[in-house]
């Protein structure tokens, strides 16, 4: 190449690099218009990668008049690109796969851009798409909960919610910080992330060996199985790593077993029987998957849970009252049977009823009440049920002896109501947060069921073990309702129903957590009583096309 030719080439290159921004913007405009033109291929693809948030990408650049967000006027990537890539790599710490955010494609396009091979427009679009999808997934969850469980009622958030954080990221040049701010801020989420990191470290170090099968292990015993038990508990930090008494089931090992049992919701008797052995030998990858699934469930929740608020963990069979950011009351609960599942939802408790009557849902009447009275003609009278037709002024009481119970079909032309009293299925009080599922919290006369480890016995509503204490908390803002007055209302069993409106409504969140961190940081794991975990995990691992975006996806 002659000097003249070289000079001409360099001059042309300099002229090209010095092109004003509008030329680059026009190129970006053309690419966006091409992607979203009528009849264009769907889903829109950039660098042979499907866009995860196409509507958001289109709206973002239209709002900027197609000015690039990740490149300077000369087309060079801005420092904010590095910040975003680090943040996308960190999605793994939230239990989300960084590959879902175009990691490989972004790396390839950056190398091509640095080598001068072009692809800057594609890089621009994929960076924006990755940010929007990551923002959505951190705040709303990657999976639409309605796709997993149609019988749930959790908030959905449209793409417009994430355009402002993206604009802020571009303004400040700190996309990593704006993304981090979108993740749930509750300490419970942070503790679950720490648990995921801990169990992944355990996996990298080799995990643990199973405790060999055999008869019941008792304190005072010794041998190879006791040694294996100690190693297993040391691995999860329930016991200390020491060789002293390593073959003997001593007091320290008993305490370690009890701590482990409490973390699994088992009877903490210090004995290693069938259930405890099965929990000890649950594979480490299964626990890691459970942590990932429950991090996703956290992201489905509202950003603000309320203060105070009530959390019911369906899978953990427990209720917690949170106030000033900390649990102030906790109690066992009974939830729906696997074939009458308690739904996931959020609502607001607005009133409670002392001495409630029970209007029996038709499904329960068909499945439970009618079969019971066919076996026992005195069942209705003994349990305090009335048979009714109509509502309000048109309500008519029917004599049950005039009905041929054996000949009834599936559709009942009447309904059942149980009067207040010691046998009423709702007990002495019910706590109402109106919802489409007609579920609520209530007392129960079946107190013995709270002694069971696995408490899935109801028809969908939640039975609480300490209704008096809960009523005191709920009515604390009602000045006229002292604890003594609450107790007097509870003691008036069989009296007239009494509805009390709450001067301060209380948010109620019905959750399904099979893994969470205790206040001491110890991870708790529970059985997936409704078989929901596998569906969430499968959806998290599916491609975007398989997810079908969902109603809440950008």
Image (spheres, rainbow, N blue to C red):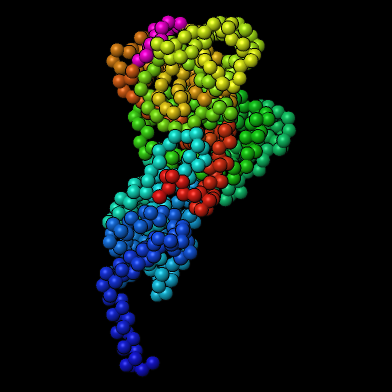
Q: Which residue sits at x=38%, y=68%?
A: 120
Whether residue 126 is situated above or below residue 94 in the rendered picture: below
Q: Position of residue 179 (x, y in %)?
A: 37, 50
Q: Position of residue 239 (x, y in %)?
A: 57, 36
Instruction: Say if the magenta span includes residue 497.
Output: yes
Q: Which residue sits at x=35%, y=36%?
A: 304
Magenta highlight range = 486-500
Of 71 and 346, the residue lying toward us: 346
Of 144 and 519, the residue lying toward us: 144
Question: Residue pushed farthest right?
Answer: 214
Of 485 and 384, the residue lying toward us: 384
Question: Is 33 left, or right, of 361 in this rendering?
Answer: left
Residue 333 shows in the view? no
Whether residue 6 is situated above or below residue 32 in the rendered picture: below
Q: Position of residue 152 (x, y in %)?
A: 47, 34
Whether residue 389 is situated above or below residue 131 in the rendered picture: above
The number of callouts visible is: 0
Q: Which residue sits at x=49%, y=49%?
A: 548
Q: Quadrant of residue 123?
A: bottom left
Quarter holding the N terminus is bottom left
Q: Which residue sits at x=53%, y=17%?
A: 413
Residue 18 shows in the view? yes
Q: Position of residue 345 (x, y in %)?
A: 44, 32
Whether residue 194 is situated above or below residue 507 in the rendered picture: below
Instruction: Say if the magenta span includes residue 226.
Output: no
């Amino acid at each position: 190449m002659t000097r003249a030719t070289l000079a001409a080439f360099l001059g042309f290159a300099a002229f090209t690099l010095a092109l004003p921004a509008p030329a680059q913007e026009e190129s970006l405009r053309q690419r966006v218009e091409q992607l979203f033109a009528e009849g264009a291929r769907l889903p829109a693809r950039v660098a042979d990668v499907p866009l995860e948030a196409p509507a958001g990408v289109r709206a973002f650049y239209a709002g900027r008049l197609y000015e690039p967000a990740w490149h300077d006027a000369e087309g060079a990537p801005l420092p904010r690109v590095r910040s975003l890539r680090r943040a996308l790599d960190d999605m793994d710490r939230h239990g989300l796969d960084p590959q879902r955010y175009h990691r490989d494609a972004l790396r390839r396009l950056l190398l091509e851009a640095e080598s001068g091979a072009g692809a800057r427009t594609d890089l621009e679009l994929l960076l924006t798409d990755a940010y929007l999808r990551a923002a959505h997934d951190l705040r709303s969850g990657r999976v639409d909960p309605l796709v997993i469980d149609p019988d749930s009622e959790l908030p959905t958030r449209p793409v417009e919610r994430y355009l402002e954080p993206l604009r802020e990221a571009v303004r400040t040049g700190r996309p990593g910080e704006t993304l981090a701010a979108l993740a749930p801020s509750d300490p419970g989420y942070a503790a679950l992330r720490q648990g995921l990191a801990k169990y992944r470290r355990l996996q990298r170090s080799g995990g643990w060996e199973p405790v060999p099968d055999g008869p019941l292990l008792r304190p005072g015993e010794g041998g190879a199985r006791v040694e294996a038990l100690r190693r297993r508990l040391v691995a999860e930090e329930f016991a200390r790593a020491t060789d002293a008494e390593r073959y003997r089931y001593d007091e320290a090992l008993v305490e370690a077993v009890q701590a482990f049992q409490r973390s699994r919701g088992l009877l903490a008797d210090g004995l290693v029987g069938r259930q405890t052995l099965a929990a000890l030998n649950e594979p480490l990858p299964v626990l890691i998957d459970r942590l990932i699934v429950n991090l996703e469930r956290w992201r489905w929740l509202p950003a603000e849970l309320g203060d105070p608020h009530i959390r019911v963990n369906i899978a953990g069979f427990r209720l917690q009252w949170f106030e000033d950011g900390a649990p102030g009351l906790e109690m066992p609960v009974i939830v729906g049977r696997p074939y009458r599942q308690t739904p996931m939802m959020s609502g607001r408790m607005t009133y409670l009823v002392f001495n409630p009557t029970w209007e029996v849902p038709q499904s329960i009447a068909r499945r439970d009440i009618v079969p019971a009275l066919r076996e026992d003609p005195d069942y209705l009278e003994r349990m305090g049920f009335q048979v009714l037709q109509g509502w309000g002024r048109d309500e008519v009481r029917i004599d049950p002896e005039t009905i041929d119970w054996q000949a009834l079909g599936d559709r009942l032309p009447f309904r059942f109501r149980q009067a207040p009293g010691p046998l009423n299925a709702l007990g002495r009080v019910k706590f109402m947060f109106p919802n489409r599922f007609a579920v609520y919290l209530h007392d129960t006369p079946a107190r013995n069921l709270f002694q069971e480890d696995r408490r899935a016995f109801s028809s969908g509503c939640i039975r609480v073990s300490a209704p008096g204490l809960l009523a005191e908390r709920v009515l604390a803002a009602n000045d006229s309702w002292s604890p003594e007055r609450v107790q007097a209302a509870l003691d008036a069993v069989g009296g007239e129903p009494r509805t009390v409106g709450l001067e301060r409504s209380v948010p109620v969140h019905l959750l399904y957590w099979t893994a969470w961190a205790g206040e001491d940081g110890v991870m708790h794991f529970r059985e997936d009583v409704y078989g929901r975990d596998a569906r969430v995990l499968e959806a998290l691992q599916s491609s975007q096309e398989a997810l079908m975006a969902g109603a809440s996806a950008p």
